[in-house]
Image: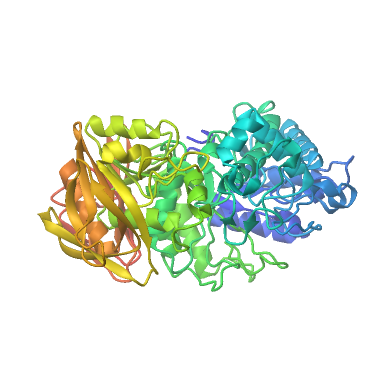
Amino acid sequence: MINDKLPKIWHGGDYNPEQWDSQEIWDEDVRMFKLAGIDVATLNVFSWALNQPNEDTYNFDWLDDKINRLYENGIYTCLATSTAAHPAWMAKKYPDVLRVDFYGRKRKFGSRHNSCPNSPTYREYSEKIADKLAERYKDHPAVLIWHVANEYGGYCYCDNCQDAFRVWLSDKYGTLEKLNKAWNTGFWGHTFYEWDEIVAPNMLSEEREDNVSDFQGISLDYRRFQSDSLLDCYKLEYNAIRKHTPNIPITTNLMGTYPMLDYFKWAKEMDVVSWDNYPAIDTPFSYTAMTHDLMRGLKSGQPFMLMEQTPSQQNWQPYNSLKRPGVMRLWSYQAIGRGADTILYFQLRRSVGACEKYHGAVIEHVGHEHTRVFNEVAKIGNEFNQLGDTLLDTRVNARVAIVFDWENRWATELSSGPSVSLDYVNEVHKYYDALYKLNVQVDMIGVEEDLSQYDVVIAPILYMVKEGYAAKVERFVENGGTFITTFFSGIVNETDIVTLGGYPGELRNVLGIWAEEIDALHPDETNEIVVNGSRGSLSGSYSCNLLFDLIHTEGAQTVAEYGSDFYQGMPVLTVNEFGKGKAWYVASSPDAEFLVDFLQTVCEEAGVEPLLSVPEGVETTERVKDGQTYLFVLNHNNKAEAIDLNDSQYKELLTAQQLSGTVELEAKGVFILAKV
């Protein structure tokens, strides 16, 4: 439970009363929040300039009033530290707080996420205001959780960052000799003899747009460094708060598959993971599900917070479509089914000016409760009150895991070849999507996770094999696990240096194959995966594209071969018996039909069964606590669907109905089923 003061699914969102100067509006807000079942408001996210009008003056009286007003009406506070955008006076007096962008241009004051993470000024004042806020509100009964800054992100290339990068490298490598070896600086005459010869890799030095780098090791380390630098800023505020409030949880809102920060590393410093979910109207439902599972996986399955979602439409996408009737409720329960213990919105009242005035809100510009969106929010609020603490702290139990690693992603994207169309996240999602269609529950895990709890582990595009990971995989397979990896795996180590002796490097032993060459074709050009006979659901031929490993078996069995080109007849799908388990290698990027048939075969052989057999477009997931299972059935379709409950007896929690046999689930409808 995030905080036992509010033992239910939290319902609320970002509230910016400082944007209004009207007692009447503030009173109306509270009245409507209560109608909608809003019980948590996130305050003070972007209020640094209001809280601190100059470097010597702090003013929290306005915040006292808002926290007290809400609490007197039964609404708790998620209290932010306001440090997501520095004040104008700070930028004017201390320009070191301003970032230098990828092109080497010094920013001016404006926008947000605009502070240099290695600015001494930013670090001093952000830590100080977090300390003052924590000291002031440490005993306030309204404060449920601390929210540090907001949506950390972006890189800086200023002199402060460059100097700090050199220190970071010195701490990491110890000597320039080790650094030169790790980066292979004998290439292109890059040998460094003094630390201050190293410069930040940007458009002025090693990099060009679209993740193009001449020295991947340098660029990879700079991404690690910038992620660590921003994390250090978070930790400064975290520690300032923690000394005053040791028992109140602290978080910051993440952004799903956001590319710039290593969220597995960040999650270690967060008491609870929170994130902001903003799919577009055409985002695959499985992609949103995968991202929820990834956020849950950051802390090994611990329930997370949905910190933001829009009640209706966004303002920053190319086409800002409305959420259709029922979709907000459906997507809210999708989050809960995959581990969320809160549903919070951005925003509670719609702004009147600047770029977020057209971003959706619980209270629209019309200013009353007689809107479609408000009624949907109120329905959700009523249902959460009805559910109480039933679902809190339930866990998702999966027997299949997919490995996701930000450092591996950075290295893959920075690679100078073999294809500009290779997209790490897309390849991971393809495997997830197939399991989603099969209604097989999945954990998204990092490379540090214990593999022994799973029957099947899938690591698409495991380009970078970190120290000890190959041995970890071997132990998992030897003990009976099934491991799957793909083309462009086992190529480099943690510093992006190729592992010699044949691809897939350290994975060669467990996979029982070696790759001689990698062919890269335009994504429109395809080859065939021709199955030798049949195996489970696999039979006939399928399409593949993008990259094509030319592999030789050395102990593995060839399950399928390429159907054309000069490598016709060479293996494209292999399986290697290793100890008590199996290791599969998929040598190209296959079509969706292949992945469904392949993963169905793998799951059947491993004894992994779907949660429920349901029509296409219906999603299932399950949370468990104290031996009680809660099966979520979500109908993403625009028509009602028949759901076969397989002779089991269930209580549906939202309606209290007893269900069995074949039942109808309405379009955009939700069942939460407790077996009886």
Using the image as rendered, state which of residue 661 and residue 275 is in the foreground: 275
Using the image as rendered, state which of residue 3 and residue 466 is in the foreground: 466
**Residue 238 seen in render:** no
Residue at point 53% right, 64% down?
A: 374
Q: Position of residue 464 (x, y in %)?
A: 44, 43
Using the image as rendered, state which of residue 450 and residue 419 is in the foreground: 419
From the viewer's perspective, tell me whether residue 168 is left or right of residue 64: left
User: Which image quadrant for residue 111?
Assistant: bottom right
Using the image as rendered, state which of residue 349 and residue 27 is in the foreground: 349
Would you place residue 4 above or below residue 103 in this image?
above
Residue at point 71% right, 31% down?
A: 240
User: Which image quadrant for residue 226?
Assistant: top right
Q: How is the image coloured?
A: rainbow
Would you place residue 471 above or below residue 157 in this image?
above
The quarter of the rendered structure image containing the C terminus is top left
Q: Position of residue 23 (x, y in %)?
A: 75, 57
Residue at point 19% right, 40% down?
A: 555
How many numbered discs sit on the rendered protein?
0
Would you place residue 571 above or below residue 543 in this image?
above
From the viewer's perspective, tell me whether residue 428 is left or right of residue 138: left
Q: Position of residue 186 (x, y in %)?
A: 60, 42
Q: Position of residue 187 (x, y in %)?
A: 59, 46
